[in-house]
Image (cartoon, grey):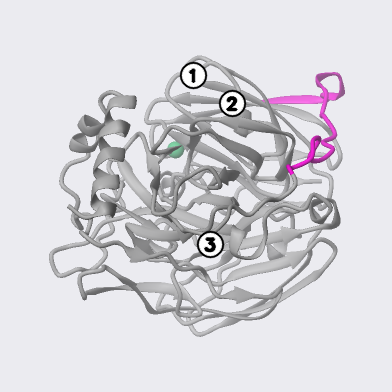
Amino acid sequence: MDRRGFLRYTALSAGAMAVGGWALGAACEGFPTLPEPAVRAPLRFGRPMAGRGELVASPGAGIALGDGRVAPAWGYNDEVPGPTIRVRRGELVDIRFRNELEQETTVHWHGMVVPSEMDGHPARPVAPGHEFAYRYEVVQRAGTYWYHAHPHHHAGEQVFRGLAGVLIVEDEEEDALGRPTGDYELPLVLRDARVDRSGALRYASDPTSPRGDFPVINGVPYPEHDVARARYRLRVLNGSNARVFRLALSNGAPMTVIGNDGGLLEVPESVSRVELGPAERVDLLVDFRQYAPGEWIALQCLRSGWDLLEFVEGDGEPVDKPPIPTPLSMIEPLSPTQVRAERTFVFEGHSRINGKRFDPERIDFRVPLGQVERWTFRAEGSAPHPIHVHGTHFQVVSRSGGRGRVFPWERGWKDTVLLLDGEVVDVLVRFGDYRGLYLIHCHRLEHEDGGMMLNFEVV
Ligand code: C2O
Ligand code: CU
């Protein structure tokens, strides 16, 4: 066994002991259709793209499986994930989108608050061979957002085949913090996938067992990444159709949560794990200064037992940076005393909210612009249900049943919140920017496609 293999071996056994049942968890997942390779492929990143330019959805992309085979995929600008779009608050985004797929699609800017006609609503499809110019102003805070396909009935398949990418918003408040940038900032799109014997992606739209069986990070199955002895910012997106990740470092070291769906938290929070449902983001600082050159650390998922991403520590002197200041940002708290209306949403089975299935022609409720409301989300079977609201961000105020608490990574502004079985989550929400048609839905994409989605109008 070489040095790396030895370090890996000891880290694995330590990890297995630290979290009992870890290896067992892995066994429960069944045999992956793509096993972990002896040598991991290097991580890569979406090509940088500005807020102006051309975005093309086409079947011209691929996922290299690491054994010489390439699984054909659908990509934006031939990439999986698509380009990493970076914009600044106040900027005008102007992206000419072209659909070169053989089916309708739309581009939804998840977490971005945009006018309803720019939101990628499934009622505004872009037909095969057609173009649409997505134009909007970046009105919200710095943070990690994303974009993905959102057509009627086919969001699950299109995202599974690769149509997703990261969108980063920057602003002055965040610049002032001196957080890690450049090579020290890692946008990470975590997802799972599944292939058939020929190495082609195998998509099953079944809402009961839609999960993949091996990890793909930034389009690379089982990657590794060389890190310097420095502090890194991991901008993590769960880009899976249905899988919930429980993220932790293999050595159990703490990670510092500095942000989530809607940007920076008020204060950094130290955690040893983060539970991340589909479409949720978490912004983590990980300190690699304390490890020895050549040491191996993995970002693991404790639910699946996967080593999602292996970090290999570089040599050289630790890079010293000033500590992250506290508070990180100011967050206006929405207060229960401001609440003017209450609504309850019951997520039932695989396809219904309050007994209804999505009908693109029907407007299910209306919300006055600028009004604070309390929305209660309740899971009635078939969870996890990651609940997403378009056109705003909300604040999670309570969770009862199930896990019974609000977690540190759920503070601040969220656009998606995870509901497990038996859970009731209350959020305070306000639509402050635009009137028009928006959506609330389960972001488990097979549930969304099955109809677990409602239209509402901000009036
Ligand atoms: Cu990311 Cu309506 O979704
Ligand atoms: Cu659901």
- Tag 3, which secondary structure? strand
Mark 3 and mark 2: span between their CA atoms? 26 Å
Residue 202 screen position, x and y as percent: 24, 61
Which residue type does callout 2 highlight? Answer: Phe
Above or below residue 252? Residue 456 is below
Which of the labelled discs sits on residue 407, or is there none? 2
Which of the labelled discs sits on residue 148, or is there none? 3
Within 10 angstroms of label 2, few (less than 14), some, or many (20 or more) residues?
some
Q: What residue would you read off at disc 1?
A: 403
Q: Is mark 2 within 8 Å of ligand 2?
A: no
The stretch of residues the image draws in magenta is 323-343
Which residue type does callout 1 highlight? Answer: Arg
Which of the labelled discs sits on residue 241, or is there none? none
- Tag 1, which secondary structure? loop
Q: Is mark 3 within 8 Å of ligand 1?
A: yes
Q: Is residue 254 left or right of residue 62?
A: right
Q: Are marks 1 and 2 in contact (CB under 8 Å)?
A: yes
Residue situated in front as seen by the camera: 371 or 217: 217
- Count up the numbered dots: 3
